[in-house]
Image (spheres, grey):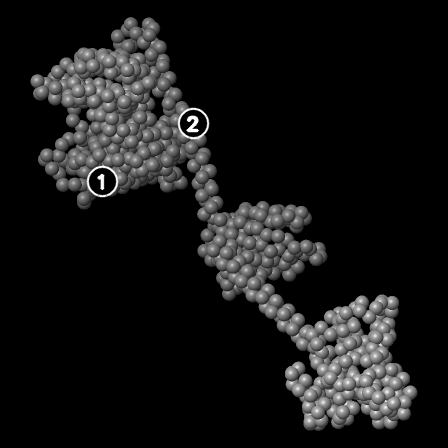
Amino acid sequence: MTERLRSSDRRAVSGTAGVGSRISPRGVARKRDCFLDPRVKPTLNGLARRLARTRDQLMKRWLAETSEQCEKTDVGCDPQLAGYFAFAMEEVCAGLLIVETDPSLLAHISVKLPGKSLPAQWRVTDLFKNIESLQRCLKEEIRSYFGTGAATVEVHVRAHETVERTFRAIIESAIEARMQRQAAEVSVAQAGLQRALTALQATEERLRVATSAAGIGIFEWCGVSRKGVWENRRMYEITGQPEEQGPLTGTEFMAQVIHPDDVELLRSHFQSRLLSREPVHVAFRLYRKADRALRTVEMFGHLGPAVGQDDFRFVGSLCDVTERADAEAKLKDADRRKDIFLATLAHELRNPLAAVRNAGHLLGHSAGADPLRREWLRNVIERQTAHLSHLIDDLLDVSRITTGKIELKRQTFDIAEALEHALEIAMPAAVQRHQDLISLPLERPVYVNADPARITQTFSNLLDNAIKYTEDGGRIIVAATVVAHEVCVTVSDSGVGISDDAMPHVFDLFVQGSGHGEPSRGGLGIGLSVCKTLTEMHGGAIAVRSEGRNRGSEFEVRLPICPGKEEARRGFAAGQPHCARLRVLIVDDNVDAALSLAMILNSHDVRTVHSGEEALKIAACFDPHVVLLDLGLPGISGFEVARRLRDHQLLRERLKIIAVSGYGQPEDMARSSAAGCDSHLIKPVDIELLLTIMGRIAEESNAAG
């Protein structure tokens, strides 16, 4: 546009421009000679020279009228105003020169404002006011110029018209520039607004995704209208309200879905927050409208400032926390049962210990002289230590089961063997309570592929449970039948029975008398849980039935049958009589344990030592057949003693090392085996098992000559 205007200016000066062209006079004035002969009558050229000579005075006068602050300042004090004045004067002078050359170009004067020719703070009214004052100063100067010379009226009028048209063009150009600048500002504002809206939409979308993923419902309630606005579908899912019916109001929410016992809790909490303006945070229960399912929810929210009485604006969130609440309740229940278990464990351990301590005291005093009383005290100690051992075994079983470390030693055997052994274990307790223990055996052998010890433990636990929860003189029946490809063993009693609410928890860990609806009658509450786990590990199933309180109960165990084999060896072979006298070395830092074990094995040649160093010295000269080795020795450990004995050239061929330890985990047994032990017995040692092992070693020694 600028290049086209400047080209037009050049054509105007040369007299070749057409009438219909719009002319920009900028630049032409610089090329014309403004100093003509002063004796010539007043002309537009002379007026242009006059304005150029008096520009500084005109600027000072105009600045004084434009602003009171500019009355005492220099021309250069405000570069923007000075630049604007210089631009206007240049355009007027250029216009005068062009019109002098060709009066017909007067109607085509145009102006293009430079980028920063007008002060940015000027409004449109300021523009008109200041241009008017500048135009007035120029007109006064024009009248002064033409008043001193003989000029025609036509030239005078043309001068005023040139100034008028130039300033009109300046005003038009200024307005157009201002409009373009405002349009650019509006465009920038619109772009910023669009970016803000886009960011807001993205934030809202992220919020919707987050609340949806977290299962959070967003809502708003108004106090005056009592209406609600639900921001997402999750509110309908939590409350069960049909979407087509719209959101519930606050009143409907309280009346239709809140659990009646929690209405007052929610109302009082909300009222207190209305007064304190603290955030709302409360958990309560509700009945889902769709299916009347009871759910636990948690509400968070903030109350807006009240506009009037009883008015509020509440924006909140609702989250279904039923699973979390149930988990917390189960955790509290587990913690409660853990405390009960620890208290019961202490009680169960102290009872047999008290009996053993009393028996030991009596044996050391007058009762030890009476053979009958001494025999009775011995039986007491054996029964109570067996009970302690049973409790410890139960605890270890639970530990192995919960950590997944229990291993089954399967073999094929007749299920009747396990039942017979379990009945033998339970019979003394039943006789003591005058209970009838009736067995209905199978007519033929039924073989299972299982761990004999674990199956016996399962039946023994069921019998022990039946004996404890059956009154004195009651009846317990053990029956075995074959159903399809399974053997079904039932243990039924005439005891206290099981209530309906306790039935689902019978096999839970640490559940004792509560599983029967009455106080505990001894035990740790882990026996039935162990039965269930062991049965399922064998591919079987266990179930319980009862017709209610005081109507007895029945436990049923089902195990898969495997084809019977004549060569299937019995899992409970009795110990063979000793065939040879063995040299036995007992190594135990507990003197009482070592000496009592030596007394049990008094049919053999026995030596006892109480440290690893002594064991190595005695073994070198005693040349034992068997070493009963405690693993937890002071100084040299039992593991190291076993390794050194195996390294001894004279002992390693025929020596049998039996580890005797209170550690009985699978990793403990693997470690003792790696050290060179042939067997691993757990304290307190099963005497019958020890005698069986000793008999087998004696047989082997006798056969070897």
Residue at mark 1? 559
Quadrant location of the N terminus in the rendered image = bottom right
The residue lying toward the viewer, choosing from 47 and 446, is 47
The residues tagged by marks 2 and 1 sit, at their Cα atoms, a distance apart of: 35 Å
Q: Where is residue 660 in the image (x, y as percent from the top left)?
A: 26, 22
Residue 612 quadrant: top left
Say what amino acid the circle numbered 2 marks.
Answer: Ala
Residue depicted at 77% across the width and 80% down the height = 90
Residue beneath the point at 14% across and 19% down:
698
- Disc 1 is placed on an element classified as strand
- Label 2–label 1 contact, CB within 8 A: no
Spot occupied by residue 474 in the image (x, y as percentages of width and height): 30, 28
Q: Is residue 668 left or right of residue 133?
A: left
Task: Choose top left, top right, bottom left or bottom right for residue 640.
Answer: top left
Amino acid at circle 1: Leu
Q: Residues within 10 Å of mark 2 (few under 14, many from 20)?
A: few
Residue at position x 79%, y 80% in the image: 89
**29 on left or right of 207:** right
Of residues 537 and 602, the one drawn nearer to the viewer in this rendering: 602
Residue 425 as seen in the image, left or right of residue 342: left
Name which quarter of the figure residue 61 lies in: bottom right
Q: Is residue 15 left or right of residue 595?
A: right
Which residue lies under the disc numbered 2?
Answer: 343
Residue 642, compared with residue 614, is above or below; it is below
Residue 81 appears anywhere in the view: yes
